[in-house]
């Protein structure tokens, strides 16, 4: 007698999931795995950026300090600039877009997964090159390595080459991921998911991908020219040989301005997902918010010369930059207005994501209000290159990338891991971060605006009136770092120990909450027919109505989707 | 830090306006946010209004924001044009024919500023100018990008190698003003400072005369010693 056929194991919630091993993640082209790689890497680099910032602020805690030598300080500064923008902020935004947007449109996978995979690992190679530079000589050319300083005549070691290669690899990676996102959003939308029904976050993914497609190659061109100048006797940026140092300034500032807008768009779009769900009210006007995000991307990038107000460019260009910057008041104002109007009349549940979202709005508003002053040329001639500029930029970027990024983290963490992050640790972390950010950067407005303390300097002098401001700023950065570390610890601990979350812990409106937590590799077993911008709400309504009409369901009986 | 020239007067006023406007905007957003979060919290028990806004309200809000932006634009242009206006030499200043400004060249190099006066005198670190005189400072650089920044007298200007930039100012009062280079230029960047000493026109003329004579004497002496075979 032959052995009886083995019965297949009972299917309860799907196939039993194994924790992916290193090789599976390393070879996966699944947008969810790649998104998690980007986010995890970004949070790791946030930690490194904090270390670099703390070391610099320790040096600047007291006048004429000797804690760091000028060369070491300049190296920390260069590492910090690259890490904060290229290895933390942009990949964090892209990681969330890459993970969430395909789920939100009801796609089973992305359109060009291998391209996205190559892009992700190119990005990972970038910081590997930069931090390997610590083993020899990191760049000393600062956050934006202006030629001729970054040219081989003044910095002959290969620090700047490593910086250029690292940021180049990362930027190329971002561009490839952006191409995959654009293709996916065009081609892989579920039936009924017209553009007008796309969630705001998916729209933001499209906007930021097109933006990266525009500004990424500009930076790559500039980096190539820099490498040629340094290594092959190029004269692109050599003022006395027919080139121009200003060319680098234009190209690099186009990228940095666009990236600045990208981070703010990411933060505002994540907030536009969180607020309606937790206020149990639809977003006040979707069209206005989405249109504003498009305007922010375009106008913000066109305002790049706002960073060059002290350079020898014509006054006409400065006025053009001012016009673009001031025009941003309209879209930013509309987004903030619509977010606050969404809360008005709602039933707001103050959970961790909304707390961080509110903090993000607050910090971003301070940064943008300060940027208004900076865009008027007469004021730019006083405030640019001072720590006032540092403060304005950090309020906007810490608000956007850190507070906004953490809001997104708390919001989508249950979807990615099946567990919620700790609520009380989140609150403690949030308030520490708020206190830290305010203490770290408000004094710098005074030090730069009223006393003229300059930026990028490894020390400041006695009797220049800025002692107290700098000491407060150093204490503030320590507080901010402690707060950030609490959230990072929260994320690490909650992966195993957090409260178990179902597929829809927040009552969200978009399709990612229809998938399991974490989703199956193919995202959805069943795709609902999308008929509005709030498909999950339609599903919940349909289930509620069906329960009213049908008899009491048996325990364990599944309700079909309408 | 007090403004001591017409241009920086404008900048100082605009700074305060910007500060007040910025504070009002921040308070508006944050108070609105706080109010909405507290007043409409779920614990109060109200059901949420499923209301959305129409295009009309958006246009009105957008229009108001746009008007505000235009007002700032006008403000920015007016103040910037005023700050850019080359202030004419006053009666107690150094009179030059054709009402021309006093042209001095400021050359940035790692990590010093060198000032070249019209009579071929030069000085390092310290710039001497006569009071109440329109001074046109031509900014050059021999190596990397520097930024000349004496906030009491003029807005910052970059000195970019291969290009010439200009800072025009008229100092209103005698005294000493300090400045610092504001673009990272290497290891010695933080110590790349400068001082401007504003003196009466007579003192200024004496200074450039004496300096030029001293330099000429030193150069002649060197030539003498070379011809006498005393130097390697």
Image: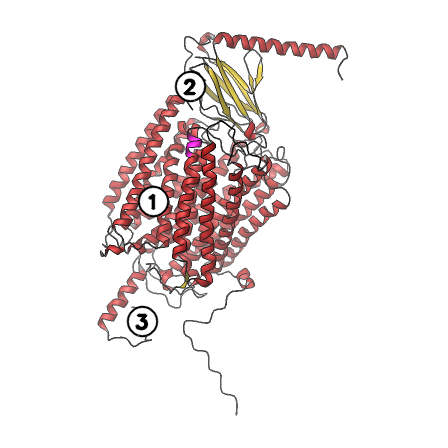
- Mark 3 and mark 2: Cα distance apart in space: 78 Å
Point out the frontmost of discs 3 and 2: 2
Q: Along the polypeptide, which appears first: circle 1 or circle 3? A: 1
Residue marked by disc 2:
B4
Residue marked by disc 3:
A560
Image side of residue A223 versus residue B72, left or right: right
- In the displayed structure, would residue A35 be above or below residue A370? below
Residue name at image x 56 percent, y 41 percent: A76
Look at the image and give the residue range highlighted in magenta.
A445-449
Point out the frontmost of discs 2 and 1: 2
- Mark 2 and mark 1: Cα distance apart in space: 43 Å
Secondary structure under tag 3 reads loop
Looking at the picture, tell me which residue is in the foreground, B39 or B159. Answer: B39
Image location of residue B214, percent across then percent down: 62, 10
Can residue A172 be seen in this snapshot?
yes
- Mark 1 and mark 3: Cα distance apart in space: 38 Å
Judge if badges 1 and 3 mark residues of a common chain.
Answer: yes
Image location of residue B221, percent across then percent down: 69, 10
Image side of residue A397 versus residue A2, left or right: left
Secondary structure under tag 2 reads loop
Q: Give the quadrant of residue A301.
A: top left
Q: Is residue A447 magenta?
A: yes
Residue marked by disc 1:
A292
Q: Is residue A20 magenta?
A: no
Looking at the picture, tell me which residue is in the foreground, A521 or B223. Answer: B223
């Amino acid at each position: 007698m032959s052995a009886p056929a083995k019965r297949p194991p009972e299917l309860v919630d799907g196939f039993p999931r194994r924790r992916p091993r290193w090789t599976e993640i390393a070879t996966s082209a699944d947008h969810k795995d790649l998104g998690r790689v980007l986010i995890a890497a970004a949070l790791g680099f946030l930690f490194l950026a904090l270390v670099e910032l703390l070391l610099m602020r320790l040096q600047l805690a007291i006048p004429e300090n000797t804690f760091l030598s000028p060369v070491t300080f300049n190296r920390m500064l260069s590492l910090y600039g690259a890490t904060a923008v290229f290895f933390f902020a942009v990949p964090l935004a892209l990681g969330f877009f890459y993970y969430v947007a395909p789920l939100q449109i009801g796609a089973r996978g992305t359109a060009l997964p291998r391209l996205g995979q190559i892009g992700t690992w190119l990005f990972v190679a970038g910081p590997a090159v930069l931090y390997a530079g610590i083993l020899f000589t990191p760049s000393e050319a600062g956050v934006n390595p202006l030629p001729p300083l970054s040219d081989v005549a003044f910095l002959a070691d290969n620090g700047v080459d490593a910086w250029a290669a690292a940021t180049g690899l990362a930027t190329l990676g971002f561009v490839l991921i952006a191409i995959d996102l654009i293709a996916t959003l065009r081609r892989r939308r579920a039936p009924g998911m017209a553009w007008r029904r796309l969630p705001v976050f998916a729209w933001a993914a499209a906007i930021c991908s097109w933006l990266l497609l525009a500004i990424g190659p500009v930076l790559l061109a500039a980096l190539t020219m820099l490498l040629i100048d340094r290594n092959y006797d190029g004269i692109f940026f050599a003022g006395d040989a027919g080139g121009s140092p200003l060319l680098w300034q234009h190209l690099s500032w186009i990228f940095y301005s666009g990236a600045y807008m990208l981070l703010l768009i990411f933060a505002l779009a994540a907030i536009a997902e969180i607020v309606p769900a937790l206020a149990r009210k639809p977003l006040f006007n979707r069209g206005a918010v989405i249109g504003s995000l498009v305007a922010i991307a375009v106008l913000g990038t066109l305002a790049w010369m706002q960073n060059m107000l002290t350079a020898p460019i014509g006054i006409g260009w400065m006025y053009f930059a001012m016009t673009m910057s001031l025009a941003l008041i309209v879209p930013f104002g509309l987004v903030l207005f619509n977010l606050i109007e969404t809360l008005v009349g709602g039933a707001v549940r103050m959970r961790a994501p909304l707390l961080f979202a509110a903090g993000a709005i607050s910090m971003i508003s301070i940064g943008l209000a300060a940027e208004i002053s900076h865009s008027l040329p007469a004021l730019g001639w006083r405030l640019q290159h001072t720590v006032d500029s540092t403060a304005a930029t950090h309020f906007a970027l810490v608000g956007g990338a850190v507070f906004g990024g953490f809001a997104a983290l708390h919001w989508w963490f249950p979807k990615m891991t099946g567990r919620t992050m700790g609520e009380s640790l989140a609150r403690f972390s949030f308030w520490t971060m708020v206190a830290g950010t305010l203490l770290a950067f408000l004094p710098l407005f005074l030090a730069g605006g009223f006393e003229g303390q300059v930026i990028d300097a490894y020390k400041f002098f006695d009797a220049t009136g800025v002692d107290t401001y700098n000491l407060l700023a150093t204490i503030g950065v320590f507080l901010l770092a402690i707060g950030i570390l609490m959230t990072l610890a929260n994320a690490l601990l909650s992966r195993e120990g957090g409260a178990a979350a179902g597929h829809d812990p927040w009552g969200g409106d978009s399709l990612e909450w229809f998938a399991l937590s974490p989703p199956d590799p193919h995202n959805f077993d069943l795709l609902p027919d999308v008929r509005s911008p709030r498909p999950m709400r339609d599903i919940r309504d349909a289930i509620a109505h069906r329960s009213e009409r049908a008899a009491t369901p048996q325990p364990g009986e599944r309700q079909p989707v309408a | 830090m007090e403004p001591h020239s017409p241009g920086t007067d404008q900048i100082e006023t605009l700074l305060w306006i910007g500060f007040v406007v910025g504070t009002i905007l921040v308070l508006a957003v944050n108070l609105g946010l706080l109010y909405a979060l507290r007043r409409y919290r779920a614990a109060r028990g109200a059901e949420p209004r499923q209301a959305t806004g129409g295009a009309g309200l958006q246009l009105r809000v957008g229009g108001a924001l746009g008007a505000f932006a235009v007002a700032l634009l006008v403000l920015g242009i007016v103040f910037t044009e005023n700050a850019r206006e080359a202030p004419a030499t006053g009666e107690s200043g150094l009179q030059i024919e054709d009402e021309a400004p006093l042209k001095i060249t400021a050359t940035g190099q790692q990590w010093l500023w060198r000032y070249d006066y019209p009579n071929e005198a030069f000085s390092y670190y310290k710039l001497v100018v006569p009071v109440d005189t329109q001074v046109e400072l031509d900014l050059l650089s021999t190596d990397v990008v520097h930024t000349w920044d004496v906030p009491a007298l003029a807005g910052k200007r970059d000195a970019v190698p291969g290009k010439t930039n200009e800072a025009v100012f008229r100092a209103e009062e005698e005294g000493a003003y300090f400045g610092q280079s504001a673009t990272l230029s290497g290891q010695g960047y933080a110590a790349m400072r400068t001082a401007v000493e504003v003196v009466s026109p007579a003192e200024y003329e004496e200074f450039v005369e004496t300096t030029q004579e001293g330099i000429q004497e030193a150069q002649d002496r060197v030539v003498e010693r070379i011809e006498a075979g005393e130097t390697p």
